[in-house]
């Protein structure tokens, strides 16, 4: 997508010259991983993420799964990036790689226990 794309937002079609990226990560933690371990890992990811230019927000928490469609994924987090280049800076950073490896180690099947969506949004 370029910077002049059309987005559908809340039933409206809008033309925006700037997009943001929602980096959504959903985790299927191993049964032996405590709530405290999950919390600490997310707090470390949050502190790292928020230290980078272009990161607008970091939110995490348990999956409430009100629709009963994602029961295997107990927790997740969302990082809001100001741009694709901010996401790339985050993804290429050595600390992200280290924290990501640790997160994979805590999930069922390693990286197979994690789902990632990157959503462009106005």
Image (cartoon, rainbow, N blue to C red):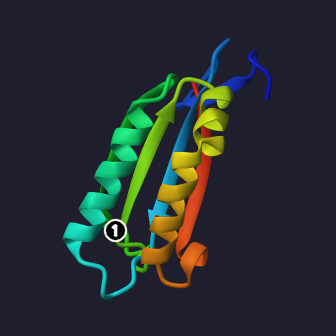
Query: Which quadrant is the N terminus positioned in?
Result: top right
Residue at image position (42%, 76%) is 106
In this picture, residue 33 sits left or right of residue 24: left
Residue 119 appears in which quarter of the rendering?
top right
Label 1: element kind: loop
Work out which residue is located at the far left of the displayed protein and give it.
Answer: 36
Q: Residue 97 appears at what percent x and percent y?
A: 58, 54
Residue in the foreground of this view, choosing between 84 and 34: 34
**Label 1 belongs to which residue?**
65
Residue at image position (39%, 77%) is 29
Q: Residue 13 appears at what percent x and percent y?
A: 63, 23
Residue in the foreground of this view, choosing between 14 and 25: 25
Residue 60 can be seen, yes or no? no
Q: Residue 60 appears at what percent x and percent y?
A: 32, 51
Query: Which quadrant is the C terminus positioned in?
Result: top right
Work out which residue is located at the far top of the displayed protein and give it.
Answer: 17
In this picture, residue 74 sits left or right of residue 102: left
Residue at image position (49%, 83%) is 108
Label 1 Cα neighbours within 10 Å, binned few <14 / some 14-19 / many ≥20:
few
């Amino acid at each position: 997508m370029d910077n002049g794309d059309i987005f559908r937002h809340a039933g409206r079609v809008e033309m925006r010259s700037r997009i943001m990226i929602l980096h959504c990560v959903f985790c299927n933690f191993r049964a032996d991983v405590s709530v405290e371990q999950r919390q600490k890992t997310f707090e470390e990811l949050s502190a790292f993420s928020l230290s980078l230019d272009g990161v607008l927000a970091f939110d995490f928490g348990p999956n409430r799964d009100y629709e009963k469609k994602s029961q295997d994924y107990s927790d997740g987090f969302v990082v809001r990036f100001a741009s694709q280049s901010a996401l790339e800076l985050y993804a290429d950073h050595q600390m992200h790689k280290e924290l990501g490896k640790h997160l994979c180690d805590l999930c069922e099947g390693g990286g197979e226990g994690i789902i990632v969506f990157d959503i462009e949004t106005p």
